[in-house]
Amino acid sequence: MNIIQQKTHEFLQKNHFINIEVPSDGNCFFHSLQIYFMLNCIIKSSKIFYKNFTGIPPVENTFQYNQAFGQKTTDLRNQIFKFIRDNEEIQNLLCLYGGYENSVLLMEEVNELNKDTKYEIPLFDLFPIIVATLYKVNICIYQVDIINDYTDCVFREPQIYKSFNNEEEGVTINLLYINGIHYELLYPDTILFQ
């Protein structure tokens, strides 16, 4: 095991996470969210099922179930952009936080980001807050930087993103952000192995 693998293993154990790798295809942020929703629905459903033994388990959050099954990450991306396009209050907040002079300039960038695999636009940096607001969750991002010609790594302090109204939600989606270019899902091992 090299030093990067060792430090990553220690980080995962210390924080009780399982790292779920996703494709590096420009949709990694959305893949991570999609897998979170899917796992969350399966685990909640199976726990209810095994508790009740009465047949098909109910899903507490139909929205998350629909997100997880039968939709692609591009559908998830489109849903987030529809939320921005249809919500003037969110547009105003994005103009304020993103430094856009007006909503026309903002929406040009929104339309560009709505293209599959597109993420290298400044607005994308605000996506954790947008997602937190839309799905009523917290987004916690752990950044890791690979350094010294890929021989070492440094884990930064996590950043927690809340909804625009700054309310702390009960559910937190944890993501690993590698070298500022790739997201992966960090799923709590305590949920998987209870």
Image (cartoon, rainbow, N blue to C red):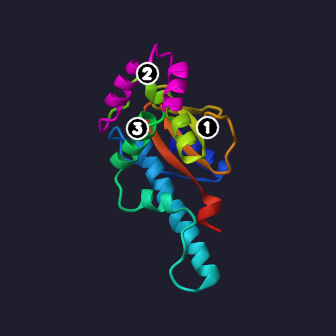
Label 2 to label 3, Cα distance in Å? 14 Å
Is residue 146 at least partly visible in the picture? no
Badge 1 amino acid: Ser
Please give the residue where the numbered disc 1 appears in the rendered image.
Answer: 163
Q: Nearer the viewer, mark 2 or mark 3?
A: 2
Q: Residue at the location (55% across, 71% down)?
A: 45
- State how far apart marks 3 and 1 are (Cα): 16 Å
**Can see residue 40?**
yes
Above or below for 56 versus 30: below
Do the residues bearing badges 1 and 2 touch, measured as CB atoms within 8 Å? Answer: no
Left or right: residue 44 versus residue 148 is: right
Residue to which mark 3 is pinned = 81
Reply yes or no: does residue 22 show up in magenta: no
Residue at 65 percent across and 32 percent down: it is: 157
Quadrant assignment for the C terminus: bottom right
Q: Which residues are magenta?
A: 88-117
Q: Of marks 3 and 1, which one's residue comes earlier in the chain?
A: 3
Within-10-Å neighbours for mark 2: few <14, some 14–19, many 20+: some
Residue type highlighted by circle 2? Ser
Instruction: Work out whether mark 2 precedes mark 3 in sequence or the reverse, and give the earlier one.
Output: 3
In the image, which disc is placed on residue 128? none
Q: Crowding at label 1, few (<14), some or many (≥20) Cα neighbours within 10 Å? A: many
Question: Where is residue 100 drawn, in percent x and y?
Answer: 47, 16
**What percent of the width, then of the height, locates residue 131?**
52, 41
Residue at 55% in and 21% down: 97
Q: Which numbered circle lies on residue 103? A: 2
Between 82 and 129, the residue placed more toward the observer is 82
